[in-house]
């Protein structure tokens, strides 16, 4: 019985955590693909450190640096430079460094989050970053000690504080193992297993080609659990999806490619409007050919 309860508790805690990270921190705050109402945004920012253990401003800043420097030596967490397992530690070091520079108001970091109207959370301003982990450990113990359901307590704690592992799965395998739908200038990949485990975040190649899209899935098998969550947020009146920036469907992409080919053949500017089905046009998304793989360091 306690095993079933533990599985259910882990599932709930994991889902809560990944909803805050993938839907709110990532798609809403970092990319504005989902525009939250001011009240929802305040709620997300205030509760975020407690639900995820991560400061929202530092997370967004580090993530934007990842997009700017993706798979270069300046990337906060790239398996190309740190190796698959090295990403686990690289992302932790980068997060701590980003937080420290934001607190010092280093313009190299603050300029990446100038558009956001909130600062570093008070727990992190006072060096209490461990506090959410301790609070959740206390809740887990409060459940486990009187009932003897230690497995349930552990499931709660690991589910709630699972972000470092989720982040590692996405940041490592999502940039090392998998196919590519779009030729972008980094090593991003679409990893179906990580996409399933981490609410669509495994489709890094789709995401890096269309970072402002709230939907990460492109092909029918690119199951993106974060997308229906975004739609739920919208249906509840808590925000609105930027549908003008959505990743195209395969049929729309094909149509777009045909138009681009025609324009290239006639030496026309390939980015001159109108193009069907997507508002994005950049050198990184003009080609649908699979890119040649770049070297990735062996695991470990
Ligand atoms: Zn990425
Ligand atoms: Zn992103």
Image (cartoon, rainbow, N blue to C red):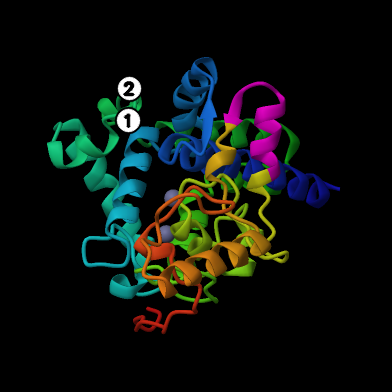
Q: Tell me, yes or no, whether the highlighted magenta stretch contains residue 42.
A: no
Q: Are marks 1 and 2 in contact (CB under 8 Å)?
A: yes
Q: Secondary structure at mark 2?
A: helix
Q: Which class describes the residues within 10 Å of circle 1: few (<14), some (14-19), or many (20+)? A: few
Image height of 276 relative to 245, above or below: below
Point out the residue furthest to the front here. 266
> What is the magenta range?
228-240
Residue 125 place in picture, x, y as percent = 26, 26
Residue 65 location in percent, x, y?
29, 50
Residue 105 in view (yes/no): yes
Name the residue carrying label 1: 128
Q: Residue shown at 41%/84% (left/top)? A: 292
Image quadrant assignment for residue 294: bottom left
Question: In the rendered image, which residue does mark 2 sit on?
Answer: 122
Q: CA distance from mark 1 to mark 2?
A: 8 Å
Query: In the image shown, does 20 or 183 lie closer to the viewer?
Result: 183
| 235 within the magenta span | yes
Q: Residue at x 34, y 84 (%)?
A: 295
Front residue (pair 247, 101): 247
Examine the rendered structure and indicate whether residue 79 appears above or below residue 123. below
Q: Which mark is residue 74?
A: none
């Amino acid at each position: 019985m306690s095993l079933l309860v533990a599985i259910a508790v882990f599932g709930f805690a994991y889902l809560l955590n990944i909803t805050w990270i993938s839907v709110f921190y990532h798609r809403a705050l970092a990319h504005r693909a989902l525009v939250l109402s001011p009240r929802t945004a305040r709620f997300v920012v205030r509760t975020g450190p407690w639900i995820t253990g991560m400061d929202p401003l530092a997370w967004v800043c580090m993530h934007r640096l990842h997009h700017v420097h993706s798979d270069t030596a300046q990337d906060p967490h790239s398996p190309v430079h740190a190796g698959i397992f090295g990403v686990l530690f690289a992302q932790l070091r980068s997060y701590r460094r980003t937080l420290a520079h934001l607190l010092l108001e280093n313009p190299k970091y603050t300029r990446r989050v100038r558009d956001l109207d909130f600062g570093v959370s008070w727990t992190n301003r006072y060096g209490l970053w461990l506090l959410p982990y301790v609070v959740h450990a206390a809740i887990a113990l409060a459940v486990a000690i009187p009932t003897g359901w230690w497995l349930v307590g552990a499931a709660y704690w690991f589910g709630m504080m699972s972000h470092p592992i989720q982040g590692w799965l996405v940041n490592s395998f999502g940039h090392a193992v998998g196919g590519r739908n779009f030729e972008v200038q980094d090593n991003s990949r679409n990893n179906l297993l990580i996409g399933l485990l981490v609410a669509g975040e495994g489709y890094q190649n789709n995401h890096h080609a269309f970072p402002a899209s709230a939907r990460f899935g492109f092909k029918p098998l690119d199951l993106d659990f974060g997308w229906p969550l975004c739609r739920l947020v919208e249906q509840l009146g808590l925000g609105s999806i930027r549908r003008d920036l959505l990743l195209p469907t395969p049929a729309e992409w094909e149509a777009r490619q045909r138009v681009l080919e025609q324009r290239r053949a006639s030496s026309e500017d390939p980015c001159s409007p109108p193009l069907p089905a997507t508002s994005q046009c950049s050198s990184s998304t003009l080609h649908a050919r699979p890119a040649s793989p770049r070297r990735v360091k062996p695991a470990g």
